[in-house]
Image: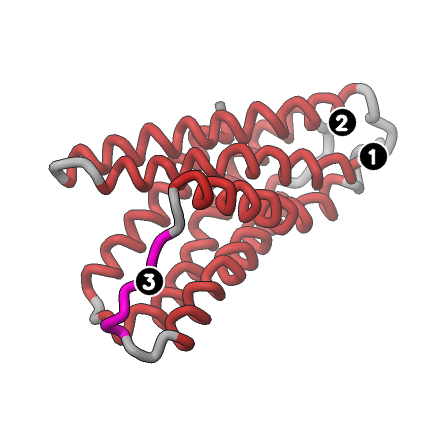
Amino acid sequence: MANSLGELLGLGATFAIGAAFFSAVSEEQSALLSAGVMTATGVIEGTIVGWAQGSVLRRAIAGISRRAWVMATVVGAVIAWFLGSLPMLLISFSNGDSSRAIEEPPQAIGLLLAAGLGLVAGLILSAAQWLVLRRYVAKAWWWLPANAVAWAAGMPLLFAGIDLAQTQGSIVGGVIVMAVCIAITGAVVGAIHGVILIALATRYWSRQ
């Protein structure tokens, strides 16, 4: 629940800022500047998601610092967003003729690529968190594959939601679709890595 709410607010704010930015700049400016905006919005997402998760963790694992968890989540989110923006930059710089449209892959391939992206992003997002978590629980390394699997499942849902939102006939409809999609993605991701977190906090508790 905390992860779902955190992602709804964090990712929701990120998408809102990104949409406003893309509508305000020219196509020539968008590639490089949008990479900076995407990276900066990682601070917003990381802060909100980290605070939501940290609030729950403080009740499950005695002594864990919510501030440290938030900072770790921010670091992971910023790095993940920066690396996620690199393909867009490379495509933009290599495609000198801006009039040439980039052909999108079939949806099935796109969702498979999204799962791969989620696998990598999950590892990046959780790496700094793991450095915090390992101070308090044994076998904290399980947090890394748990997040990788969780985001491999969640990222295709997010991409499918983006495609669905673009087919809506109104801005309000698109916003509603994205809000529901982000909440569902957060719930799925939270449910998967939440199982591992419960196990870490109960069965493998040994560093207190």
Q: Nearer the viewer, residue 88 or 3?
A: 88
Identify which amino acid the numbered label 3 is placed on: Ile
Q: Which residue is mark 2?
A: 200
Q: Nearer the viewer, residue 116 or 135?
A: 116
Identified by mark 2, the residue type is Leu
As displayed, is residue 183 above or below residue 101?
above
Mark 3 highlights which residue? 102
Contact flag, marks 2 and 1 (Cβ < 8 Å):
yes
* Residue 58 visible from this viewpoint: yes
Q: Is residue 176 magenta-colored?
A: no
Q: Dot 1: what SS?
A: loop
Label 1 – label 3 distance at C-alpha: 44 Å
C-alpha span from label 2 to label 1: 7 Å
Give how far across and how far down residue 99 sits, in percent.
23, 72
Q: Say whether residue 103 is magenta.
A: yes
Magenta span main SS: loop
Q: Please provide the residue range marked out in magenta.
A: 98-104
Q: Of the numbered discs in the image, which one, if any, rests on residue 139?
A: 1
Query: In the displayed structure, does residue 2 sit left or right of residue 65?
Result: left
> Badge 3: how crowded within 10 Å, few (<14), some, or many (20+)?
few
Residue 157 in the image: x percent, y percent? 43, 33
Q: Is residue 70 visible?
A: no
Measuring from the top left, give residue 185's x and y in whole percent.
45, 31
Residue, far right: 206
